Image: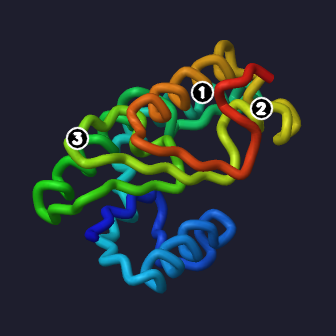
Amino acid sequence: MRVGFVCIQDASDVTTWSGIPYNVLQRLRAQGMDVELFSHLGRRSKAALAPAHLWTRARKRSASLDHFPLVLRSYTAQIRALLREYPVDVVFSTSTIPITLINCPQPIFVWTDAVFHSKVDYFEGSFTRIPSGAAGGRRKQLSAIARASSTRRTGPSPLRKS
């Protein structure tokens, strides 16, 4: 089985996202999976959001640029191009962010440690300072989960309101 492993950061780097993508990648390969790495997705589209980033910083707020529609569309276009170049049987990701908008014939599997809305207060309320930040993050999370063929998590359920 050929697996397309999608990760925004470099999944082959043990220091990425506390080593979670790296270790999942190693376990998939140890199980005999033929893994095509669709990772380190380009983030050039974020440059277009520099004004939004500077504006939130000037107001002593924070914003996750990964959740902006422009960035999500960029990730989707990159994944589609990779799927054309490297045909796989399934798409797998350790995050819902890059697969939020993807529609493809392959089944999509997501296994994540925690979902966006469950971490709203974890980082000292940084997401609650963004108007509709938590609500928007939750909508995008649920959109990705709806597209997925299967999801697994080790954190709280994204289907239950916090």
Q: Secondary structure at mark 3?
A: loop
Give the residue pinned by disc 3: 104
Count neighbours of disc 2 (C-alpha within 10 A) and say few if under 14, some if 14 to 19, many if 20 or more.
many
Q: Position of residue 149 (x, y in %)?
A: 40, 41
Q: Position of residue 87 (x, y in %)?
A: 15, 62
Residue 109 vertical placement versus 138 (above, below): below
Determine whether, in the image, residue 65 is placed left or right of residue 41.
right
Q: Give the colour scheme shown.
A: rainbow
Report the mark closest to the observer, 2 or 3. Answer: 3
Q: Earlier in the sequence, mark 2 or mark 3?
A: 3
**Snapshot quadrant of residue 29:** bottom left
Relative depth, front residue between 32 and 48: 32
**Snapshot quadrant of residue 20:** bottom right
Determine whether, in the image, residue 119 is placed left or right of residue 66.
right
Instruction: Residue at 76%, 39% (x, y): give it.
Output: 156
- The quarter of the picture where the N terminus appears is bottom left
Whether residue 28 is visible, yes or no, is yes
- The quarter of the picture where the C terminus appears is top right
Count neighbours of disc 3 (C-alpha within 10 A) and say few if under 14, some if 14 to 19, many if 20 or more.
few
Q: Are marks 1 and 2 in contact (CB under 8 Å)?
A: yes
Amino acid, disc 1: Gly
Count neighbours of disc 1 (C-alpha within 10 A) and say few if under 14, some if 14 to 19, many if 20 or more.
many
Q: Earlier in the sequence, mark 1 or mark 3?
A: 3
Report the mark closest to the observer, 1 or 3. Answer: 3
Instruction: Residue at 31%, 37% (x, y): give it.
Output: 102
Amino acid, disc 2: Val
Give the residue pinned by disc 2: 120
